[in-house]
Image (cartoon, rainbow, N blue to C red):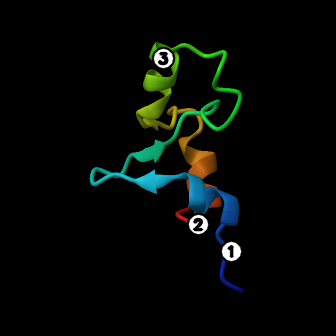
């Protein structure tokens, strides 16, 4: 059976933490920033964690399952 391919889009968007959780970036921070408040843009800067319901599907895309 051939090796499973990693999803190219997923490997660019997600990263693993030391404890095995999956980090992600927030959406809506790339353009049309003039109408967003400073506070909103600042809060979108920080990374978040993938929700527990989505962890299995992200791991599948990253070839970890």
Which residue occupies the foreground of this view, 65 or 7? Answer: 7
Which residue is located at x 52 percent, y 52 percent? Answer: 14
Residue at the extreme front of the image, as rendered:
34
Q: Nearer the viewer, mark 1 or mark 3?
A: 3
Residue name at image x 71 percent, y 86 percent: 2
Badge 2 vs badge 1, beta-carbon distance below 8 Å: yes
Residue 18 lies, with reference to residue 37, above or below; the image says below
Which circle's residue, 1 or 3, is located before the other in the chain? 1
Q: Which residue is disc 2 drawn over? A: 63
**Mark carried by residue 17:** none
Q: Residues within 10 Å of mark 2 (few under 14, many from 20)?
A: some
Q: Is residue 53 left or right of residue 42?
A: right
- What quarter of the picture does the C terminus occupy? bottom right
The alpha-carbon separation of the residues under discs 3 and 2 comes to: 37 Å
Where residue 42 sits in the image (x, y, percent)? 44, 24
Examine the rendered structure and indicate whether residue 29 appears above or below residue 60: above
| Distance between mark 1 and mark 3 Cα atoms | 40 Å
Question: In the visual, does 16 lie left or right of 12?
Answer: left
Q: Which mark is nearer the camera, 3 or 2?
A: 3
Which corner quadrant of the image does residue 16 belong to?
bottom left
Element type at marker 1?
loop
CA distance separating discs 2 and 1:
7 Å
Does 46 sit left or right of 24 as displayed?
left
Residue 49, horizontal then vertical, whole percent: 44, 36
Query: First in sequence: mark 2 or mark 1?
Result: 1
Residue 25 to residue 36: above or below? below
Residue 18, position in %: x, y? 27, 54
Circle 3/circle 2 CB separation < 8 Å = no
Q: Is residue 32 visible?
A: yes
Q: Quadrant of the N terminus?
A: bottom right
Relative to 50, 57 lies left or right: right
Q: Name the secondary structure under disc 2.
A: loop
């Amino acid at each position: 059976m051939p090796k499973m391919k990693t999803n190219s889009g997923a490997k660019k968007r997600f990263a693993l933490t030391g404890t095995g959780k999956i980090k992600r970036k927030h959406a809506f921070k790339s353009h049309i920033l003039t109408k967003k408040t400073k506070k909103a843009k600042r809060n979108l800067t920080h990374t978040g964690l993938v929700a527990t319901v989505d962890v299995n599907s992200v791991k599948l895309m990253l070839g970890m399952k």
